[in-house]
Image (cartoon, rainbow, N blue to C red):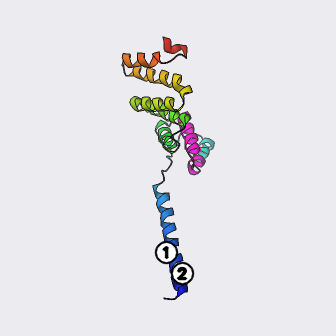
Amino acid sequence: MTLLGRILLGVVAMELLVGGAAIAWKVSAPRSPLADLSGVDAITAGALRQMVESVRTPEDWRKLGEAYMSMGFFRESEACHRVAAERNAGNAETVQQWALALERLGSLDDANGAYARAAKLDPARSASCNYLIGRNELRQEDVPAARQAFQAVREPPAARY
């Protein structure tokens, strides 16, 4: 084989390798969920579909999750917030929003774990996160755990009662 043939063979092999890696990355990337938008007006449904198609960054995932939550699509919201929290694990706001989505689904233990993680990431959020943890513990009728969470809260005043 000539030198030119080997160079061409190397170029083709590199193209196949890069193409295969791109396809594998595309296939393994999480797909954004699309809710049943049949009961939503056409303009809002179009805006949501556009958001679903353009989601790329953790911030895009978080915004899509917020949009779904505001419309009552809690499963889709949780899925979007989970991806955002996985991709941006150091962002306390994203983790706390994921916890709220978990809470809406009734996964209170998982939500409490995420709230605790958000409080650890940003100590300024510890009061609100502990309050929400205490509220969830009350929902599960675990009064001692709720009392412990509420005692860690100085504000809001509702935690005192």
| Residue 130 horizontal/vertical position (percent) | 48, 23
Determine the main secondary structure of the stretch shown in magenta. helix
**Magenta highlight on residue 127:** no
Which residue occupies the foreground of this view, 30 or 118? Answer: 118
* Residue placed under numbered mark 1 in the picture: 13
Marking on residue 25 = none
* Residue placed under numbered mark 2 in the picture: 8
- Disc 1 marks a residue whose amino acid type is Ala
Which residue occupies the foreground of this view, 111 or 150? Answer: 150
**Magenta highlight on residue 56:** yes
- Residue 3 lies, with reference to residue 130, above or below; the image says below
| Residue 112 horizontal/vertical position (percent) | 43, 28
Q: Is residue 49 left or right of residue 82?
A: right
Q: Which residues are magenta?
A: 48-71
- Residue 99 lies, with reference to residue 132, above or below; the image says below
Q: Residue at x 56, y 34 (%)?
A: 70
- Residue 22 lies, with reference to residue 99, above or below; the image says below
Is residue 65 something one can see in this rendering? yes
Residue lying furthest right: 43
Question: Mark 1 vs mark 2: which is more N-terminal?
Answer: 2
| Residue 127 horizontal/vertical position (percent) | 52, 22
Residue lying furthest front: 3
Q: Residue at x 50, y 37 (%)?
A: 73
Which residue occupies the foreground of this view, 45 or 136? Answer: 136
Measured in 3D between alpha carbons, the distance from the residue under mark 1 to the one under mark 2, in whole angstroms, is 9 Å
| Residue 23 horizontal/vertical position (percent) | 49, 63
Residue lying furthest top: 161
The crowding category of the residue bearing disc 2, from other C-alpha atoms within 10 Å (few below 14, some 14 to 19, many at least 20), is few
The crowding category of the residue bearing disc 1, from other C-alpha atoms within 10 Å (few below 14, some 14 to 19, many at least 20), is few
